[in-house]
Amino acid sequence: MNIRITPQFLRGTVVTPSSKSIGHRDLICAALASGESVVDNISVSQDIEATCRILRSFGAAIEEVPSEYPHRSAYRVRGGLKKQALPFAADAGESGSTLRFLIPAALLSGNTVTFTGHGRLVARPLDPYYRLFDERGIAYETTQGQLPLTVKGQLEPGNYALPGDVSSQFFTGLLMTLPLLSGDSLVKSTTPLESASYVDMTIDCLRQHGVEIEKEWNGSYHIPGGQAYRSGHYVVEGDYSQAAFWLAAGTLGKAVCCTGLRPDSVQGDKVIVSFIRQMGGQVEGKTELTACPSDLEGCVLDVEDCPDLVPILAVLATCGHGVTRIIRAGRVRLKECDRLHAIATELNALGADIEEEPEGLLIHGVGSLHGGRVSSWNDHRIAMALAIASLRCSDPVVIEGAECVRKSYPEFWQDFASLGGACHEEE
């Protein structure tokens, strides 16, 4: 699907989608609990569907039930993993979170599970798990390190050391599973832990589900064994990483208000508010954040702990003035696409002045763009960032492959139009 956008400013109020990151975690915790739970206020996406699909194959019963929140979904989850008589496949779609969170869970039951995936996920790195499997004698089969991956074995309590500069998702996968083992464990990073806030999010989520993790420092976690997840009713909070697009729209155009956000959230992407203010932008409020039109100035933006913000930060910097450097962003080259290269390429095609660096971007603000035809690179965050960039274009923008927003935010184009965006599918 190609979307054609006629540039005009957005304005109004949008209900922020619920956090996909927390939705994954809440559903997994509920599936690992005994008894029945309800996880409410879920914004359904392809990634969330992938997590539900694999949890069902593991033995959890998950069904959609009426939500207390408009335009959202709720899931009733009857937890419990089951021993399967035969090997079975688990399709993670294109969701790196689903895959990396659930590989350790597959080793709880002793089943033989073959993980499959699609698109770029097939080649995204899993080496930290492979090294742990080799150390602990867990059987696995893979083709040159890529999916499909077959695992069979049993996790044992103990000390787990893995690099923290590949993805924090490996830490989350272990922290969600090791508390259920009989003995205590220690998970420790062998490098400085990047995206540590995502691990903090995991610890916060586990605590709400009745499981305690003792954080010694970023990258070192003591996990008491013999714990159990608590069933109950859980509500997923709003997603700052998705709100970032609308806050950017308000900063670049007319006032936009995002509702449904938790002021005391531990989400790392909450820093989007600080980044906009650092650039000279105006954001007001707490649970309802309103971004107002602002003149932005260049600065240095360190995204080590919030890599998902890179595409929209590049848009903000491009539409501002002065020079902006986005630093410590090398890992975003390993996302759904090489996001540093993709966003630089497509914004430059619209008239930006961006230079790629090995670990970041050097952006010369140009204030406005001329429009044109660009590619989403089959990456939801690239597509949404380019949509916001269109607000500062003089001519229409066509985004190819715009359906990729379904991965995390299927209602994005409807919300874009509800705020006054002039977009339609190109014939």
Image: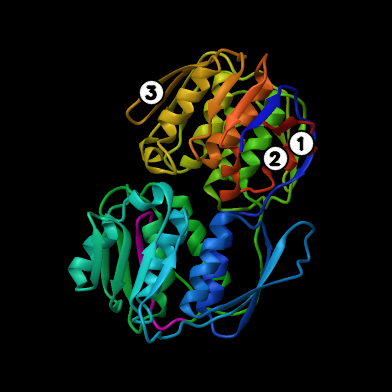
Which amino acid type corresponds to the residue marked 3 in the rendered image?
A: Glu
**Mark 3, mark 1: which one is toward the viewer?**
1
* Whether residue 152 is situated above or below residue 257 in the rendered picture: below
Label 2: which secondary element: helix
- Amino acid type, callout 2: Trp
State yes or no: residue 223 in magenta. yes
Q: Give the range drawn in magenta.
A: 215-227
Measuring 35% from the left and 84% from the top, which residue is drawn there? 182
Instruction: Say the numbered circle drawn on residue 413.
Output: 2
Q: Answer few, some or many: residues within 10 Å of disc 2's Cα (few below 14, many 20 plus, some between 14 and 19).
A: many
Q: In this view, does 99 lie above or below 316?
A: below
Kindly identify the amino acid type of the residue bearing the numbered disc 1: Ala
Camera-side residue: 214 or 1?
Answer: 1
365 left or right, relative to 409 = left
Residue 357 figure quarter: top left
Tell me the element at label 1: helix
**Sequence order check: which comes first, mark 3 or mark 1?**
3
Q: Is mark 3 on a helix, strand or loop?
A: strand
Residue placed under numbered mark 1 in the picture: 417
Residue 202, given in percent of the width and then of the height, sits at: 49, 61
Labelled pair 2, 3 in contact (Cβ < 8 Å): no
Q: Is residue 183 magenta?
A: no
Mark carried by residue 356? 3
- Per the model, the C-alpha gap separating discs 3 and 1 is 32 Å
